[in-house]
Amino acid sequence: MPLTIDFNCDLGEGGGADGELMPWITSANIACGGHAGDVATMRETVAMAEAHGVAVGAHPGFLDRETFGRREQALTACALHELVTSQIEALRGCGNVHHVKPHGALYNQAARDPGMAEIIADAVYGIDPNLILFGLAGSELVRAGRKRGLRVASEVFADRTYQADGSLTPRSRSDAVITDEAAAVAQVLRMVADGLVRSTDGSTVPIEADTVCLHGDGPKAVAMARRLNEALRESGIELRRFDL
């Protein structure tokens, strides 16, 4: 069988290039009013995704627009469950939802905190057990989703660097983000084809890739999305949404 990969972008966040990104991706993670977005942008982005045959995903984040949802928070279990549930339901009011991917600090905390990961998985399952949970490859969120009985997609990143333990390099570091198209393409092809990624200390790290994320708010996002799409296809890798 040929290799396949899902290609996703975080959209509906006010970046302005959503329409130009849609032709190159297979899944869209749409901000649900927490770190960004509102009902109008959700409806508009869902409509664009549906027009391009792109899977619609909820992208819940902390209620923190000041730092774009990138500041870690300590919430009670009930508050966290409600945060995730309310944002998924908000997007479901705008159209059919295929998957859920937490955003920013919520995503990173759940990647390493098993209790937080379980609450998120429970919230997703409680809304619809058929929803797919996107989580950082090898993370606690992936493990919690599988334990809860959800279908889970292990996510890797085109435009982020990795640490030796498989975690993402913190954004506070200057080497956290990949801006060079050739470097991003090389990293993605190796992760998808070989299941390996080079960490910032030079070590080679095993990694599972079901879906590749490119952040949609980067200055070169559209050009990079196009190049990644073309490079994957030229390498014989089929792009399709995770559940197909």
Image (spheres, rainbow, N blue to C red):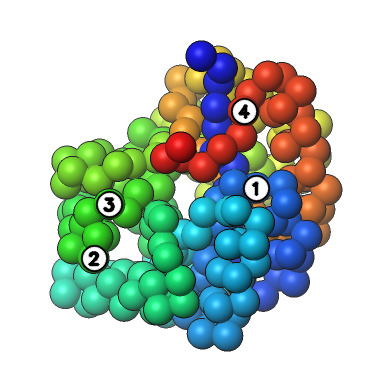
Label 1 vs label 3: CA separation?
A: 22 Å
**Residue 108: x %, y % from top left:** 41, 53
Residue beneath label 4, please? Answer: 238
**Residue 241: x %, y % from top left:** 52, 42
Residue beneath label 1, please? Answer: 25
Of callouts 1 and 4, which one flags the residue occurring earlier in the amino acid sequence?
1
Label 1 vs label 4: CA separation?
A: 12 Å
Residue beneath label 3, please? Answer: 130
Q: Are marks 2 and 4 in contact (CB under 8 Å)?
A: no
> What amino acid does circle 4 point to?
Glu
Vertical relation: 179 (above or below) 48: above
Foreground pick, 199 / 16: 16
Residue beneath label 2, please? Answer: 127
The secondary structure type at the circle numbered 4 is: strand
> What amino acid does circle 2 point to?
Ile
The secondary structure type at the circle numbered 2 is: helix
Q: Are marks 1 and 3 in contact (CB under 8 Å)?
A: no
The residue that appears at 51% across and 70% down in the rendered structure is 31
Of callouts 3 and 4, which one flags the residue occurring earlier in the amino acid sequence?
3
